[in-house]
Image (cartoon, rainbow, N blue to C red):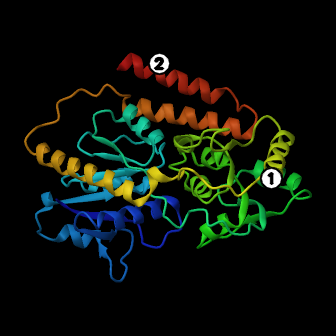
Amino acid sequence: MRKIYFLFPRMNINAGGHLAQLMLFENAKSICPVEAVTYEAREEGTLFLDEVLSKNDDNDQVMFFAHWGPHVSALIQQLASKNVVYVSYSTGYGFKIPPSVPILAGSKHTQAYWGKYSPNSPIFYLPCEIPEKFTNLHLNRDIDVLVQKRKSSRYLLEELVPILRPHCSVTVLDTWVEDLAEMFNRSKIYLYDSTEYWAQHGVSEGFGLPPLEALASGCTVFSSLNDALSDYLEPEFNCHQLRVYSKEYDAARILNALKEWKDEQQEHDPAQRYRKISIRKSLNVVLAQLNDFFDKKKLHQENIADIGLLPHEAEIQILRARLEKIENSLGWRLLERPRIIYAKLLQMLKRSG
């Protein structure tokens, strides 16, 4: 089993993708040798990528796991002669992955994306872990409605929350919370709407940990359904859809759910597929396949034609999708000129293809 170097820009980042990579790093420790490596700045007690690459070790016996989306394309080029694996959460950064680089998809949404844009790369589904601390402790819940300001839409913060405040207690978390599990166990209802945030950033919701963590902690969840959130959210079965039709309609459904809320025993763990035991079982299989792929790659040349979109076409498709998201978040259409430009570019590319 090859050793894995987990690549991080730096070690102290309060972001979901970074925390997911740290959990993957910890889980991999039980299976094979691993080390954390930074590449933006040297940190005490942590390897630095330039130093790792300067060693004369047998590079075929190691794998490099890259995950930070904006840096992945450059890292793949820098490590072109190495065994590189892309741990992909958010999508839409505008690059393609060569068939020599396997992809670990953090969601089914991400898996489908790469199945379209990099169909010849080995693709594996490996979701994020939900720690055991996110469980219903059956405590007294003194918060009616919980909202996190980070990634929340203006609609949620500026329109829906003010409507709810006169009728119930609403807590809006506007700073990073170390123990979110405790907050979920104090709350009856959790509201999450990240559509606007990801539309503005032009990339997808990579996994959407908070709604699943809230479900596992016994909260009733109202959430948007964008991107990877639809991996596990089923409206009216394990959650309710948020931002439906009108703010009055949303508010009425939330207040009704609050009125009927009960701390019930859960027959099944909503996060069972995402617990450590399940993740490690999947990781064992995936790592075995990665090692086999890198063994076989030495014996064969890439020779399957790419039937996916060409890189420049993929870029244009992504730009068009971003434009649609921006328009949807704004509630009105931009000038038609950008659409015409994209359409003409596509026609030109098809003629020259």
- Where residue 76 appears, as percent x and y from the top left, is 30, 52
Task: Name the residue at 41% across, 33% down.
Answer: 312
Task: Name the residue at 38% across, 74% down.
Answer: 41
Picture disc at residue 347: 2
Q: Amino acid at mark 2?
A: Gln
* Kind of element beneath mark 1: helix
Is residue 176 left or right of 352 when viewed as pictured? right
Foreground pick, 12 / 188: 188
Which sits earlier in the primary sequence, circle 1 or circle 2?
Answer: 1
Q: As drawn, which residue projects farthest toward the top? A: 351
Q: Amino acid at mark 1?
A: Leu
Q: Quadrant of residue 300?
A: top left
User: How many residues crowd around disc 2 within 10 Å: few (fewer than 14), some, or many (20 or more)?
Assistant: few
Q: Quadrant of residue 309?
A: top left
Q: As drawn, which residue projects farthest toward the right? A: 166
Residue denoted by label 1? 258
User: Disc 1 and disc 2: Cα gap in Å?
Assistant: 53 Å
Is residue 169 left or right of 233 when viewed as pictured? right
Foreground pick, 66 / 176: 176
Total numbered labels = 2
Q: Is residue 147 above or below residue 114?
A: below
**In which quadrant will I find the N terminus?**
bottom left
Q: Is residue 255 above or below residue 227?
A: below
- Where residue 263 appears, as percent x and y from the top left, is 70, 58
| Residue 281 visible in image | yes
Task: Name the residue at 65% across, 38% down.
Answer: 235
